[in-house]
């Protein structure tokens, strides 16, 4: 905006800075609260007044990954001494780690759900971005009859409410045995992200000067060679940004996962809320699970920061 | 349209003779995507269109009977369904208005000489990137009447948010505003930064008041982009499922997606839920149409 000159302008600017700081603190408070609760001992998670300063500990993460049961009697000093450090943390919380008959530690449901999330999000991202890149190139460079209608059709598939699509998909998946499988979710997420990937990649493709390929074609490249050797490297940044967006969407998705999976292929978003059952939930464990789940997205958001506008507007607004 | 159409190569030229023709490459690149979307989006919708005329229940082995338009007729005459739509409309209005006020307001603040602007903007954008279901769940703790930090910070004592039928929908909307105001802010910032500086300079020379400058210069120029944000958020709020489903089970927060989910997967009224899905679908397509028109308008600028 206009250069700061008058004193009125200057004090207005100071007010704006204060305002922005306050808003930032309010907006980040819930995220900070998740992160800090993930490192609290259980008895400090739900205190009044809220506990802000505390000795951080990692017992919530130990509990997150293990299956536990209530301690009926306190462990004997020998048992306590023989236990590894992380098991003592569980003892300290009044619980014990469940072991199999052969003494193996039993995992909780979380690690497998986290793995499922990774498998489904990564595979569907590769498929959606791969297909989307080719299709975007096609739309960007060739004459297509009814191009606008086709692009609208592609975008409209993205706008469908998940529950609306889920009803017939559930019946179809049940008929072919795809319910509660990784591939079932991967197909749904690929379809969901494909339209986004086409729209975003088309924007990136439109920005690559077609003269690059024309020059290559004149030099004797085939169109395929020109696409792979000239266009793809030029589009690398766009492909990466699109991939990160698709990954985040698939990673965060809840409704399809809730309806289509229940155990084997269940991802983290429907699993984490299912932990809050009856009674008083252990919020430190939920916070730990949430924290680990949000961490990749937070990192990606920083990497993506210059592409957020473009991605959130389906490539329409480029700055 | 600014689509770059490449000149078709002379078929006799060397490179066209080798490899595939442009036409077959075009088809190879585009047709799989279209087919994929038809198979996994359009075909299922046709499948459910068929079921919407039946009394099919996925939980029972009984065969589906054709009932004609009965499902549609009953749904459109069902006052409970209309109240679900009314709840949805209320939710859309509260949360979109909130997002526009907060998002546009913060964008106005940020559109000045602020130190560390880039970092602050990125931090402010974080909520919209997170999973609604997972972060929404944590808001249950924040809203907790006895040990939630919201009541503590605002000094509200043991005010009930989620278990109060009158308050629950607003609580869900507040969380939605927290998550999605950043989206409106992001688009508004793009609009604000595109306003040519010389307009403000001219206004300053004419001694125009800041009120006048805002309503006659800033707002009209940002309006198209703001409109995109509003339509997109309206569409998303209309479809909302995750947040309301996770945060509360109050009947006053039963938005249409939740009703649809319960009808289909808890009451197993499959045929009827397919009909309701179609009613929702037609509404969504109408909004999508408006959205795309605006997208193209802004793109052409």
Image: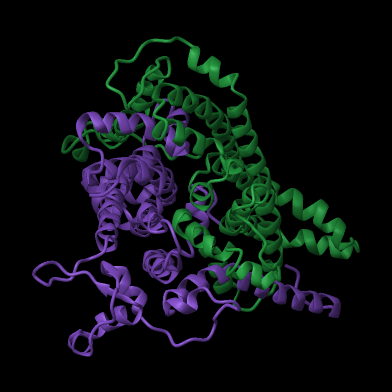
Kindly identify the residue that appears in the image at 19 percent across and 67 percent down: A106
Residue at horizontal 36%, vertical 41%? A259
Residue A134: horizontal and vertical position, in percent? Answer: 30, 43
Q: Is residue B92 left or right of residue B206?
A: left
Camera sees residue B89 = yes
Q: Which chain is purple?
A: A
Quarter in which the C terminus of chain B is drawn: top right
Q: Quadrant of residue B67?
A: top left
Identified at 45% across, 31% down, the residue is B263
Quick one: B53 or A153, which is closer to the camera?
B53
Q: Which chain is green?
A: B
Tell me the colour scheme of the image: by chain
Say how many tags the image has: 0
Residue B301 appears anywhere in the view: no
Q: Tell me residue A275's x, y (percent).
A: 38, 58
Q: Relative to B227, is A230 on the left or the right?
A: left
Residue furthest left in the image? A102
Residue A11: x, y in percent? 81, 79
| Residue A91 sits above or below residue A185 on the image | below
Vertical position of residue A5 compared to residue B108: above or below: below
Residue nearest the viewer, comparing A145 with B275? B275
Q: In the depicted view, which residue is nearer to us: A238 or B178?
A: B178
Q: Which one is nearer the viewer's eye here, B270 or A165?
A: B270
Q: Position of residue A204 (x, y in %)?
A: 42, 51
Q: Is residue B1 left or right of residue A285?
A: right
- Which quadrant would residue B287 be assigned to in this image? top right
């Amino acid at each position: 905006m206009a250069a700061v000159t008058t004193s009125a302008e200057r004090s207005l600017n100071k007010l704006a800075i204060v305002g922005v700081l306050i808003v930032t603190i309010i907006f980040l408070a819930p995220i900070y609260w998740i992160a800090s609760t993930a490192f609290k001992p259980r008895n400090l998670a739900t205190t009044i007044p809220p506990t802000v300063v505390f000795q951080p500990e990692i017992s919530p993460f130990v509990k997150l990954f293990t299956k536990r049961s209530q301690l009926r009697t306190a462990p004997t000093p020998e048992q306590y001494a023989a236990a590894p450090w992380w098991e003592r943390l569980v003892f300290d919380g009044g619980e014990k780690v469940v072991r199999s008959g052969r003494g193996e530690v039993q995992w909780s449901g979380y690690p497998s759900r986290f793995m499922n999330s990774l498998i489904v999000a990564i595979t569907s991202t590769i498929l959606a971005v791969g297909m989307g890149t080719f299709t975007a190139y096609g739309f960007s460079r060739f004459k297509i009859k009814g191009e606008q209608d086709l692009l609208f059709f592609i975008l409209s598939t993205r706008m469908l409410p998940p529950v609306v699509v889920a009803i017939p998909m559930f019946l179809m998946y049940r008929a072919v045995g795809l319910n509660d499988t990784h591939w079932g979710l991967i197909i749904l997420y690929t379809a969901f992200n494909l339209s986004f990937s086409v729209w975003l990649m088309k924007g990136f493709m439109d920005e690559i000067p077609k003269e690059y390929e024309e020059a290559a074609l004149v030099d004797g490249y085939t169109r395929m060679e020109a696409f792979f050797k000239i266009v793809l490297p030029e589009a690398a940044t766009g492909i990466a940004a699109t991939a990160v967006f698709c990954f985040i969407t698939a990673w965060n998705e809840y409704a399809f996962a809730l309806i289509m999976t229940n155990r084997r292929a269940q991802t983290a978003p429907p699993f984490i809320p299912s932990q809050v059952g009856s009674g008083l939930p252990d919020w430190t464990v939920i916070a730990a699970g949430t924290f680990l789940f949000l961490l990749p997205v937070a990192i990606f958001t920083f990497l993506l920061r210059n592409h957020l506008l473009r991605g959130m507007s389906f490539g329409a607004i480029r700055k | 349209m600014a689509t770059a159409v490449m000149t078709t190569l002379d078929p006799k030229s060397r490179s066209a003779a080798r490899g595939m023709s442009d036409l077959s490459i075009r088809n190879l690149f585009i047709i799989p995507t279209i087919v994929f979307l038809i198979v996994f989006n359009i075909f299922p919708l046709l499948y459910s269109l068929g079921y919407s005329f039946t009394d099919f229940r996925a939980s029972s082995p009984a065969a589906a009977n054709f009932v004609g338009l009965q499902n549609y007729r009953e749904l459109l005459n069902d006052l409970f369904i209309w109240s679900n739509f009314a709840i949805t409309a209320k939710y859309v209005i509260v949360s979109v208005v909130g997002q526009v006020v907060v998002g546009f307001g913060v964008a106005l603040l940020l559109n000045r000489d602020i130190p560390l602007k880039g970092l602050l903007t990125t931090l402010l954008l974080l909520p919209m990137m997170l999973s609604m279901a997972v972060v929404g769940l944590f808001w249950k703790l924040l809203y907790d009447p006895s040990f939630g930090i919201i009541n503590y910070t605002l000094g509200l004592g043991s005010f009930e948010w989620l278990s109060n039928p009158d308050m629950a929908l607003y609580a869900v909307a507040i969380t939605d505003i927290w998550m999605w105001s950043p989206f409106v802010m992001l688009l508004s910032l793009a609009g604000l930064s595109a306003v040519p500086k010389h307009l403000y300079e001219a206004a300053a020379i004419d001694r125009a008041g800041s009120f006048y400058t805002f309503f006659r210069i800033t707002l009209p120029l940002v309006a198209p982009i703001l409109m995109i944000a509003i339509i997109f958020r309206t569409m998303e709020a209309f479809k909302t499922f995750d947040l309301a489903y996770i945060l509360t089970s109050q009947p006053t927060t039963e938005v249409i997606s939740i009703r649809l989910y319960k009808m289909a997967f808890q009451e197993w009224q499959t045929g009827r839920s397919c009909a309701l899905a179609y009613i929702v679908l037609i509404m969504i397509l109408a909004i999508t149409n408006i959205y795309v028109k605006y997208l193209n308008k802004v793109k052409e600028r």
